[in-house]
Image (cartoon, rainbow, N blue to C red):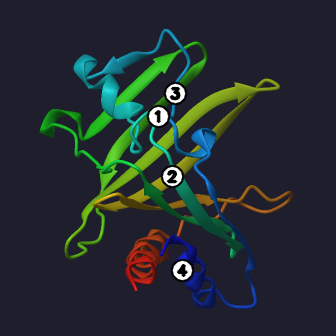
Amino acid sequence: DIARVKDVRSSFGPGFAVSDVGPTGIDPRLLGRQALPPGMKFEPPDCASFADQQMVPAGAKGNMAATTAEGEGNRFIAIAVETSENTSVDAPAENCRKVGFAGGGVRGLVEVVDAPHIDGAQTLGIHRVLQTTADGKPRTGELYNYAATFGSFLVIVTANPLVLPGKPVAKVDTQRARDLLVAAVKAVRS
């Protein structure tokens, strides 16, 4: 039951602002291909498809629910999706586990990171770093995605640092994100 993803809210203490969405129809903007600007050059060149892979099949119908928590300098989003088709998280070829890209004033990196093992599910962890220039100043953003698929279900945990005025950017608590994936899958399955 994807609505049970909200059960993870109890893992966040009073230092977190927590909100829930759904269940509602799949939002293609949230779950679609994470496209990069045209004209990007990739290294290795044959690994472009890993840099912008799509986990929910194009055109799939279904529902999603999400819980968002912000606190301790981090944002965590746990998304549970049930689709009309089987989902998959395809690990890249060995030579594509770390892919650099650059072009059009943007450069970045997409790399595989450790994901928790979950019985009966396929899991994958991805770290993305994007660097650009805004108002003449360099800007860097990073995002961790941990995903688990089982049948027509997909659970994704996204973790990124919050940019807060006058404060240094916090390190992403990747262990908490991995633990959240395990908890969210357990909640959806129960």
Image position of 21 (left or right of 77): right
x and y, in percent, of residue 174 in the image? 45, 68
User: SS for tag 3?
Assistant: loop
Task: Return the disc, 1 or 4, that comes first in the chain's sequence.
Answer: 4
Q: Can the viewer see residue 76 in this picture?
A: no
From the image, tell me which residue sits under label 3.
35
Q: Residues within 10 Å of mark 2 (few under 14, many from 20)?
A: some
Image position of 56 (left or right of 12): left
Residue lying at the far left in this picture: please name it: 94
Residue shown at the point (62%, 45%) measured from the top left: 27
From the image, tell me which residue sits under label 4.
4
From the image, tell me which residue sits under label 1.
59
**Mark 1 or 3, closer to the camera:** 1
Q: Residues within 10 Å of mark 3 (few under 14, many from 20)?
A: few
x and y, in percent, of residue 75 in the image? 65, 65
Residue shown at the point (22%, 39%) measured from the top left: 92
From the image, tell me which residue sits under label 2.
62
